[in-house]
Amino acid sequence: MEQITSLRNPKVIFWKSLRDRKARDAAGVFFVEGVRMVREALESSFPVEAVLVREDFSPLPEEIKKTPVYSMPEHVFNSICETKTPQGIAAIVRRRVLPPEGKRLLALDGVQDPGNVGTLIRTADAAGFDGLLLSPDCADPFSPKVLRSSMGSIFRMGISIPSSLPEALDELKSRGWSVLSSQLDGEPFYERKNVAPSFVLIIGNEGNGVSPAVQATATHRLRLPMRGGAESLNAAVAAGIMMYELMKDSSPDD
């Protein structure tokens, strides 16, 4: 275990820089905090490059094995973390963008709120979806706020960020997939018909919805009923309702 005591240590300066997306993208790594997130990272297929601990933290997770561990006093450790009350352990994780596999995907088209993106990743995992496609203008799935909202699901879901979401959806459609666009002017969701066993559900930007270019790829345009006075639902809430409902039509063995 290596001891670090200075705020000016080059490693500390680098770890603090990972709050910025450009630094994460350039280095190809991201930062996770807390016992649960570090354990999820260590148990996943993501390479963990370093574990950081406050000098009074114990016990170390058994999963650490040969991962380098850096111990530091509280003021140094806290300077790296974003949370107000850090749990005393964090990790530097090598980023992996995995091609989603399976028959049920969630596509995010310009979803920019980090809390929504993290919740959508977590809900897709819980509902039994196989992965996600994110347009390039979505919130960074490896940002601290998204990671906290995902509650570890980021390590279990295949996530791809294609350079063109419409092209990726067109490619799926050419293979017989149903492409379901959620939009306020669509057909009633609960009256949907002829959804293929392989499908992708699209959730659009919080303010503008699904973009015209992405709508153009859809085989189905669907809306949830609004029986009350609200005009729309939060993106993550709407997606959760639709994902669980769509899974009722899928075999648990798929």
Image (cartoon, rainbow, N blue to C red):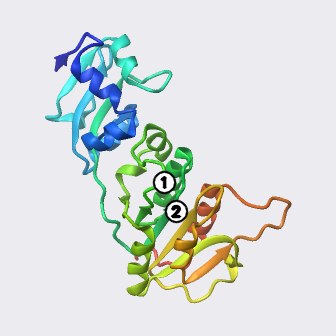
Q: Which residue matches tag 2? A: 109
- Amino acid type, residue under disc 1 in the picture: Cys
Locate the C terminus by quadrant. bottom left
- Asked if the residues shown at circle 2 and circle 1 are in contact, with their CB atoms under 8 angstroms apart, the answer is yes
The image's mark for residue 8 is none
The N terminus is located in which quarter? top left
- The residues bearing labels 2 and 1 have C-alpha atoms spaced at a distance of 7 Å
Q: Can residue 30 be seen here?
A: no
Q: Quadrant of residue 244?
A: bottom right
Estimate the x, y position of residue 159 in percent, counting from the top left: 37, 59
In the image, residue 181 lies at what x, y percent? 58, 73
x and y, in percent, of residue 180 in the image:
55, 76
The percent position of residue 79, horizontal first and vertical second, equals 39, 18
Compared across the picture, whether 82 is left or right of 46 comes to right
Label placed on residue 138: 1
Crowding at mark 2 (Cα within 10 Å: few <14, some 14-19, many 20+)? many
Mark 2 is on which residue type? Asp
